[in-house]
Image: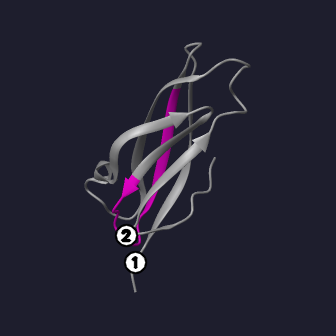
């Protein structure tokens, strides 16, 4: 599980995961995607925080995340498929701070 740094509601940030520990020698990431859901609080459209395509290079995959509801805690998950057909998911909680 990843410990993502909290995000201000106005920030637009790439959050990512490094899958080096699960990739075999020579194995690569061939596709990546991300999902987000509410853990605590209320947000009727958490998927709106996921914008653009999930990017990947080497053993890392990143997702651009925008917005969010202050005081809400989400779970951001990064999903990958490898050149060997394996599927892995990593992620963790992401909190949204209110601007002062």
Q: Residue at x 54, y 46 (%)?
A: 16
Q: From the viewer's perspective, tell me whether residue 70 is left or right of residue 80.
A: left
Q: From the viewer's perspective, tell me whether residue 7 is left or right of residue 23.
A: left
Q: How is the image coloured?
A: one colour
Residues 28 and 49: in front is 28
- Residue 70 inside the magenta-drawn segment: yes
- Which residue is tagged 1? 98
Q: Residue at x 39, y 80 (%)?
A: 99
**Residue stretch in magenta:** 65-80
Specify few, some or many for label 2: CA neighbours under 10 Å numbering under 14, 14-19, or 20 or more.
some
Hey, which residue is sitting farthest left in the picture? 44
Residues 17 and 95: in front is 17
Q: Residue at x 40, y 67 (%)?
A: 11
- Where residue 93 sits: x, y (%)? 53, 55
For numbered disc 1, what is the local secondary structure? loop
Tell me which corner region of the image, top left, top right, bottom left or bottom right, holds residue 68: bottom left
- Where residue 21 sits: x, y (%)? 73, 33
Tell me whether the residue at label 2 lies in contact with that at label 1, contact meaning CB atoms closer than 8 angstroms.
yes
- Which residue is tagged 2? 9
Q: Residue at x 56, y 15 (%)?
A: 83
- Where residue 62 sits: x, y (%)? 50, 43
| Viewport quadrant of the C terminus | bottom left
Specify few, some or many for label 1: CA neighbours under 10 Å numbering under 14, 14-19, or 20 or more.
some
- Where residue 98 sits: x, y (%)? 40, 77
Hey, which residue is sitting farthest top in the picture? 84
Disc 2 to disc 1, how far (Cα)? 6 Å
**Label 2 vs 1, first from the N-terminus:** 2
Is 63 rendered above or below residue 13? Answer: above
- Residue 82 inside the magenta-drawn segment: no
């Amino acid at each position: 599980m990843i410990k993502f740094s909290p995000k201000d509601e106005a920030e637009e940030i790439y959050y990512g995961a490094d899958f080096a520990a699960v990739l075999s020698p020579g194995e690569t990431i061939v596709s990546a995607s991300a999902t987000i859901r509410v853990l605590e609080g209320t947000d009727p459209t958490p998927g709106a925080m996921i914008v653009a395509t999930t990017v990947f290079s080497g053993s890392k995959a990143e997702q651009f995340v925008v917005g969010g509801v202050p005081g809400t805690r989400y779970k951001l998950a990064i999903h990958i498929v490898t050149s060997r057909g394996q599927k892995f998911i990593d992620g963790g909680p992401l909190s949204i701070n209110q601007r002062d």
